[in-house]
Amino acid sequence: MNKLTARVDRERLLLALAAPVLAVVAALVVTALVILATGKNPFEAFNDMLSYGSASDSQIYILNKATTYYLAGVAVAIGFRMNLFNIGVDGQYRIAAFFAAVVGGALHLPGPLQIVVIILVAMVVGAMWSGIAGILKTSRGVSEVISTIMLNSIATAVIAYLLQPGKLGQLDDAGTLVSTKNLPKSSWFFTFDAGPAGELWGFIVIAVLVGIAYWFVLGRTRFGFDLRTVGQSESAAEASGVGVKKMVVTSMVISGAVAGLVGMPTLLNDSHAFSNDFPLGVGFTGIAIALLGRNNPVGIAIASLLWGYLERTTGHLELIGYDKEILGVIQGVIVLCVVIAYELVRRFGLRRQQQRVGAELAAQAAAATDEKLEVAR
Amino acid sequence: MRRVTKVAASGIASAALALSLAACGSTSEQKAQDDSSSGSAKAGGVKVGVAYDVGGRGDHSFNDSAARGIDKAEKQFGGSVKELTAKTTDTEADRLDRLSQLAEAGYNPVVGIGYAYANSMKEAAQKYPNTTFGIVDSSVDAKNVDSIVFTEEQSSYLGGVAAALKTKTNQVGFIGGVDVPLIKKFQAGYEQGVHDTNPKIKVDVQYLSHGSDTSGFASPDKGQAAAQGMLDKGADVIFAAAGSSGSGSIEAVHGKKGAWAIGVDSDQYQQASLAQYKTSILTSVVKNVDVGVFDLVKSIHDKKPLTGTNTYSLAKNGVSLTTSGGYIDDIKAKIDAAQQKIVDGKVKVKTTP
């Protein structure tokens, strides 16, 4: 019996790996065709991506980018696990980063304490913003897809209103860039100095901790079990005594709190202020990454590293004469392929399972008839 | 079982990452140097590196006006041009990276189009002291940076004077693409121009989008709706500083007899795509981004790199009011007088409304 589970597990692992590998290979083929169609050599392009992507400064860049993307992916995945589509991560992280920057610029606490305050403010603001969608869903039945999209626009408008010279913003000398007050140097997050390769953002530590917490809470606690149960079947969860409404609001709030962290690597490690050129649209990247990583903490990490890698290397492709749209093509094709590949692999796995169960049943039946025959004899 | 595989997988992944990090010790710069020592550098001409703002070449607006200057320089001086384009998800690190890549590859000058490059250019200029950088719409305090800034408020002031002299209903409109400080300069100048000419005129102001939502620069439908609303409320001269959304506004104005539109950035009377509405285009508030960019490339070609803040003002013809169509010929004397006052410094135009 033990042997059997081992085999099944190995097969499951293989199947789980097959889908993303299939998707990436398919994406490579499609991308190669697209580059060929533009009259350029795809192998030279891939070769450049490999060599440029493996440079040490590229790796630092990729890890820094992946830190942000990982947090975005986890924020989205928390919703996904519960069958909630939190499209609002984008608005949540921006409004969270904005208020965190405002608070951080205004306070002058001792360094570490201030960093904790900034991060907490971001998490609370993100949680409140997504909590609105959660409450709307449970109290009035508003689909979270609609409400979070709308909250994204509202977040943009709120930031635009407050980030004005004379309100919470200040103009630079040239009179074109508005930003919040710079964070005092003491509340910048630590970085790992990697010499000529650049600086690795210290926030990657927090991202790893968030990943571990995500894995532990969802996979190893009663709460996580309840959450996944609600995601799989609301009525079954309700019947077994799980408060579905409470779970919806709670998971929305947690998703928003993690979303609040998304802007933190940029704010605390890079820009040190929120200005009108703060990165936009990372929440949507998070959706692609959560899909790609199948909501699995390790999968999301790999997906976000892949995303960072693609952005870094295609940026260099643009420099050596390829079209800048290549990045969008590769990313789009990968996401599409992943969705298709998982479905294919799932069906294949299902068929395999049915065949095996069928074979086992047939064997049992055969054994039973053998026995009967023996008894009869 | 599953837990073990998961832990093992994550362990292997992180180990592999650390290994590759250690193994590939060389940075991309060192790799690039290895490559370039084997390849031959192209001789002759100016190698211009351009980092566009979001949208890039082909946005029919701000980026394109810079591209015009680049094209002109390329035609005149030969050499090569490399263009990179920003993404909306860009961080400071991305922008710095873009400028560094260009400088690293030997492009000189490296021009950043748009104020978003301000902070990253400060760092890049330090990193590459032998490269001349250029930035449009912002100023960077470094020895090797040419800050190309425009006095949009001055030309907008003249637009305001023209509007005030042409309105019959004593009500004019201003449509801004996005409520960023840059566009507010246009608003401030326009309002001041109108009120200095005739304090009784009412100026309707509307912005098409806000903050980080930059759709207002590229939504002709929004421009049209906003202009229609103002026309319905009685305004009869409308100035739209809204990128390509402005074409929608011009279209709406064309639908009302006796109403005038004021164009922006380039001479919109001459634009082929707006030819059917040109009889409604009173004048355009021009901002010669192409001149600023061209000047920078030319200075490198002449081996006398421009640096410091170069203000393209009304006095230097960096911004101006066009006269194509001849619709403002009758009020030319008054506009010239206003222009003279600004050039002489008798009138100070505000940059914030």
Image (cartoon, coloured by chain):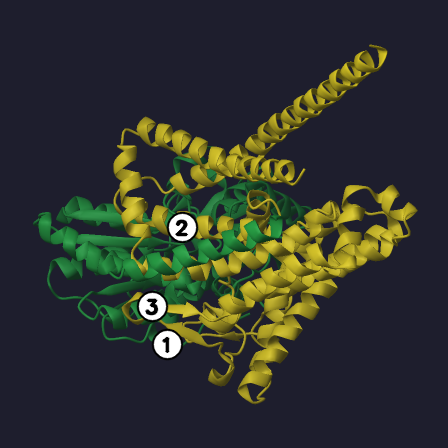
**Disc 2 from disc 3: Cα separation:** 16 Å
Question: Which is nearer the N-term, disc 2 or disc 3?
Answer: 3
Circle 3: residue type:
Gly
Pick out the residue farthest to the top: A377
Q: Is residue A50 above or below residue B96?
A: above
Relative horizontal placement of residue B168, taking residue B341 as reference (left or right): right
Circle 1: residue type:
Gly
Q: Position of residue A134 (x, y in %)?
A: 79, 55
Q: Give the colour of chain B.
A: green
Q: Quadrant of residue B259?
A: top right
- Is residue A326 at least partly visible in the picture? yes
Viewer-proximal residue among B135 and B202: B135
Q: Position of residue A131 (x, y in %)?
A: 76, 60
Assign a secondary structure to mark 2. Answer: helix
Chain letter for the yellow part = A
Mark 2 lies on residue: A309
Circle 2: residue type:
Tyr
Q: Is residue A169 above or below residue A248?
A: below
Q: Residue at x 26, y 32 (%)?
A: A41
Q: Quadrant of residue B145?
A: bottom left
Mark 3 lies on residue: A198
Mark 2 falls within which chain?
A
Q: Is residue B22 above or below residue A240?
A: below
Q: Residue at x 51, y 73 (%)?
A: A268
Mark 1 lies on residue: B345
